Amino acid sequence: MKRLVDVIRRFPLSLIVPTVLLLLVLVIPFLASFITSADPVKIAVRDRLALPSLAHLLGQDEFGRDRLARLLYGGQVSLAVAFASAAIAALVGVLFGLIGAYFRGPFEFVTSRLADIVLCFPPILLALLVVTLFGPGALTLVAVLSILYFPVFARITFSEALRVSALEFVEASRALGTPSHRILLGTILPNISGPLSIQFSLTVAAAITIESGLSFLGLGVVPPAPSWGQMIRGARGFMVQDPLGIFIPCIALTITIFAINLFCDRLRDVLDPKSITKRARLFVAQASKSACEVALDMATVARIDGLRLETLGAKSAPIPLIEDVSIDLREGACTALVGESGSGKSLTSLALMGLLPETIHRAGGQLSLRAKSGELVSLDRADERTMERVRGDEIAMIFQDPMTSLNPVHKVGDQMVEAILAHRPMSRNDARGLALKLLQIVGINEAERRFNGYPHQMSGGMRQRVMIAMALTCEPKLLIADEPTTALDVTIQAEIMDLLQRLRSEYANGLSMLFISHNLAIVSEIADRILVMYSGQIVEDGPARDVLFDPRHPYTKALIASMPSTHEGLHSARGDRLQMIGGAPPLPHARPSGCSFRDRCPVAMPACSAERPQFKSFASEDRRVRCLKAGELAA
Ligand SMILES: Nc1ncnc2c1ncn2[C@@H]1O[C@H](COP(=O)(O)OP(=O)(O)OP(=O)(O)O)[C@@H](O)[C@H]1O
């Protein structure tokens, strides 16, 4: 009982109306004997096509049979046939699709060829074949419809499962030795349930309509037994004299199909953890409208001011991911954002680009940019058209994994030309010339040959160079480099860092950079300013040298102490041995009260759990530290 109450309490609100509607549609036909005492097959020729009366609420059909009784009893047959055939088709199709996609080889061959063979058969021919074997009737209909629809499920499952099987979390499950059936049912199936639930609703709807066609040909429900298909078939001959006859079963069909589609659609949204509710969308829209503009001084190219990002799930309360993050990106300077995985570096940069995932929204703060023209743009209030111009033209971004950033089916040169033409009004020939020049600038030998090559013909380092060249096509003011060397080996890392340094010094109008990394050693090579991020907050901010050689936050100190570096000064600052930072950063939903770092902090005191530390600035120093002991640590 307690369990039932719990289930009811957690039942998603958005499913209530579709569930009630679906239950009504499904249950009412099965209450036929309580609703009417009329016999659905009893003929009364004298009353044929009679209008509705108290005795016959929906009138009488071409044989004088009670239409309400036929509608209710016929609904039982139609719904049972439709649901049974859709369920069998889904079960068989999903099984074939999953096995074919996961095990490949002969399993793939059997799945695809079987589906091809069934799809090649004209449906009527197939129906005739099954009727010859089993004779007409509701069971025959179920068999015909299941055979007709299972290839659709098999194909959808096959292609979706193929896509999901290639994702890293499935590889990870395999590497952990998870048995195949668990991966198939526990990992892959939930990830493809969205398109399958929609296909199920479409199949039920289609099965109800096809039942009418097959019954019309005498291949389905045998008269005088009622079904909605039979009712439509019978009423077709009297459409002009008695439009109600065809209207009633059609309305029943429409409401049923609508209820099933609505339910499956909502169910998909509820099952998908990435979906957001309408209410949440409205909230986002309102939050965006309430933003206000910030003034930028001439030395600042972009500013993030008091940024707060929250999750926006359909099921749970919002969880803060980023809190009170403020960053000034200075003209021509490289600002580095450093922190452990999950600290919020990427989300901060994606917010600036207007590329936040749908499930995350900006709950506070402002984002502003000084464009090349000198115009001030409020990125938090900009519409999508403005953001399209800003991306690439004003702010460009390079990502961690150059292997997946380029489109594998287009030549490298074509992709570069398209990127140039999207922002710059010039001929294709000029764009080609510019692309070749950029390839040379980023140090790609045999630029012409590489221009005509595909991404898979290049090494990781070369692809990252291409990505950098593409990022520079419109001479942006700001380049966001999100862990641009993490996926590369050490020697290539060094080459890419040299390239970025060279580009900064050669760039005509001064290239400002937001360099994101978890690696302080790499950052120390390029950054003018370092911001250390921990658990969604900036905890230390200052000129690179000061932060590296005189860290004031215990987390920054711990990061430096754990960092293998060839940098002499850093070695002497922390002694010879590398030191580990104990524990792990808290997950966003489980951040402790007070300072998020206190559980790992060697100098934590009781006050650290009582209050969230605010930024502490130091007189005559251009630095900020978010720690109650910042003053002491500085001393
Ligand atoms: N789409 C999302 N939905 C919900 N939470 C998310 C989403 N993307 C990121 N997060 C959470 O937001 C926090 C910050 O993530 P973010 O990717 O910005 O971290 P990061 O510092 O860039 O880490 P990494 O170096 O691993 O990329 C993490 O706790 C992460 O789990």
Image: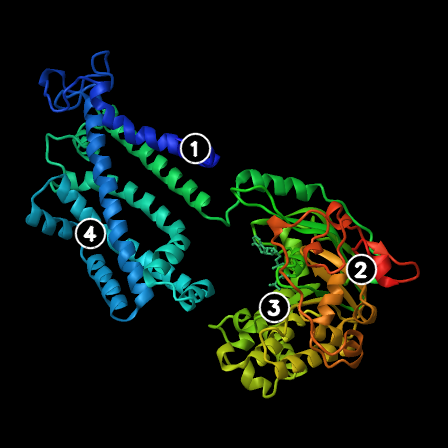
Residue type marked 1: Ile
CA–CA distance in space, label 1 to label 2? 57 Å
Pointer 3 residue: 399
State yes or no: discs 4 and 2 in contact (Cβ < 8 Å).
no
Callouts 3 and 1 close, C-beta under 8 Å: no
**Percent of width and height locating residue 480:** 68, 66
Q: CA distance from mark 2 to mark 3?
A: 27 Å
Q: Residue furthest bottom?
A: 446
**Quarter where residue 256 is shown:** top left
Q: Quadrant of ligand 1?
A: bottom right
* In this view, 93 is above or below 10: below
Q: Which residue is mark 2?
A: 374
Q: Is residue 338 left or right of residue 145?
A: right
Residue tagged 1: 8
Relative placement, left or right, of 109 versus 555 is left
Q: Residue at x 26, y 45 (%)?
A: 86
**As shown in the figure, which amino acid type bears the numbered disc 3?**
Phe
Disc with the residue nearer the chain's start (1 vs 4): 1
Picture coordinates of residue 422 (x, y %)? 61, 65
Residue 489 seen in this snapshot? yes
Hey, which residue is sitting farthest right in the picture?
A: 620
Residue in front for this viewpoint, 28 or 174: 174
User: Residue 147: which disc?
Assistant: 4
